Structures are given as structure tokens and as C-alpha cells.
Image (cartoon, grey):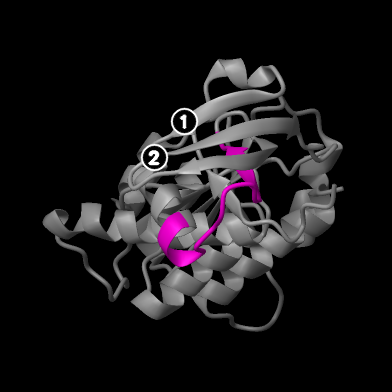
Amino acid sequence: METFHLKRFFVTLPSSVADFPTQLTIEDDFVVHHLRTVMRAKVGESVVLVDGERRQAYLATLQTLEKRTLSVQIEQLLTKAASELPSVTLAVALIKEQRWDWLIQKATELGVTAIQPITSERTIIKLAEKDIPKKQERWEAVMRSAAEQSEGLFIPAILPPVSVKALCDQVSAQVQRILLAERGAHRDTLQTTLRKYSSQQHSPDQTLLFAIGPEGGWTDGELAQFEQAGFAFASLGQRIMRSETAAVAAMAAVVYELGS
């Protein structure tokens, strides 16, 4: 059965879903509301349910649609992609809301694993501690929608903002760290850096982390912190890009160089 036209929803499914067909009750408020109120779905219609923990998608048929719950029959496991990108985290200095939403949406479509907001010395956007949970909730909604639209198998993580120092202090030595900086001597292009990475032996769970600065770029002090933390410096070329453009360009390079 062709499923490209079916609506996709992220849900958490029990281990019993391995048996087909099987009946399940779903109490996810977002899914129930969207199917009943937004889509006005009918009993007997098919949907695709995606378990982000397993990174698997299932074909399901709607059995009942109640006010707060729905029941489905899981029909089959859909074919999973043969290969995936490595785990990629984008650590990006916060930018204005509309541009930030565009960044996280497009990065999600391209397969990013996590996004780490950064507050740097030249970051214009400053978030109060009390506002962060509400912002994260909004960002998660943007990424969830983008993951469903692009037929992703997981919703990327969106982490609380950290300073440059905190990022450098907490990053693991097992992570391949790449800082994108527009100017400076002795740095490879990003494509060269990724080709070096792909030619080496890496464990399956190793992560690529890109650090992308704010408008105005990194300060000399921040560049020194990144260098001391073991970041490889890489360039996206001669053009000066906005933060959101650089983030998408980095993800596109990963898809091209390291994807199938």
C-alpha cells in the first residue's frame, strides 16, 4: 500500500506492537485533537504512526475516535530506510524568532538529531530563565510538524540554551567538533573536513557537532575557547552567510557527503 499521502503522527508505542495485527488505545492529546478536530478523520481511515524511540513507522487503521482517546489497529511495520545519517547536533547562537523557527524547521527536514541553542557575546536574543520552557515547547511543536511533513522517523531534541563556555566544557571528546567560521587562515572547507571524517573509522553512535555563530560572528575570546576544546575550524566558502543559512548549508553538506 502506498503511504506517501497518509498523515503521519509521532506516538509512543508499547513493545507488543511487534505482533501484527494488534489493537492499541492512544491517549496523546495532540494526535487525538488533530485527527478528530483538524482532519475530521473517520473510522476505517489509515494513518502512519511513528515511534521516535524505535525510529520505526507503522501503518494503522482507525477503529474508534473518542473525545480524549482513539483506538487503532496496527496493520504492519513499514519499510525502514536502509541507511541513515550520523548523529548531528547543531549548536547555534540564538537569532530572531522567525529566522530561528525557519532554521529548526529546515534542519529537521534534513535529518538533524539535536539542536543546542547558544548565547554568545554577540547574541542579540537574550532569554529569561522563566521563558525557556515555553520557548522549548514552541520549538518542539515546530520540529514535530517538520518531522511529520518530511516523513522523518524521530523528532530532534531541542536543548536549553547554554553559553559558549558551557558548551565547550560539556562537549565529549568522543564528539567530532566542527566550528564554522567565515574567515581566518589554516582552515579546510567543510566538504574537506567531512571527507576526512568519513574516511576514518568511527563508532556508530559518534556524533558530529557544528558550532554556528551569531550575526557579527564569534569574538576572538570565543574562538580561543573553541580551539582549546578541540574544535576543528571549517569554512563554508567565500560568502558570508546568515546563521540560519549556514546551519542549513552544513546539514546539506552532511547529507551530500555522508548520506546514502
Res 25 label: 1
Residue 222 seen in this snapshot: no
Q: Give the x, y percent position of residue 99.
A: 44, 78
Question: Which residue is pictured at 67% across the width and 18% down the height?
Answer: 18
- Name the N-terminal-most of marks 1 and 2: 1
22 is higher (above) or lower (below) than 2: above
Helix or strand or loop: what does disc 2 sit on?
loop
Residue 44 magenta: yes
217 is higher (above) or lower (below) than 164: below
State left or right for residue 257 relative to residue 90.
Answer: right
Helix or strand or loop: what does disc 1 sit on?
strand
Graded by Cα atoms within 10 Å as few (under 14), some (14 to 19) or many (20 or more), the crowding at tag 2 reads: some
Question: Which residue is pictured at 44% across the width and 56% down the height?
Answer: 36
Q: Which residues are magenta?
A: 36-52
Q: Quarter-wise, where is residue 37 in the image?
A: bottom left
Name the amino acid, label 2.
Thr
Check if mark 1's residue and mark 2's residue have beta carbons within 8 Å.
yes
The residue labelled by disc 2 is: 69
Q: Nearer the viewer, residue 2 or 55?
A: 2
Q: Quarter-wise, where is residue 170 in the image?
A: top left
Q: Nearer the viewer, residue 52 or 244?
A: 52
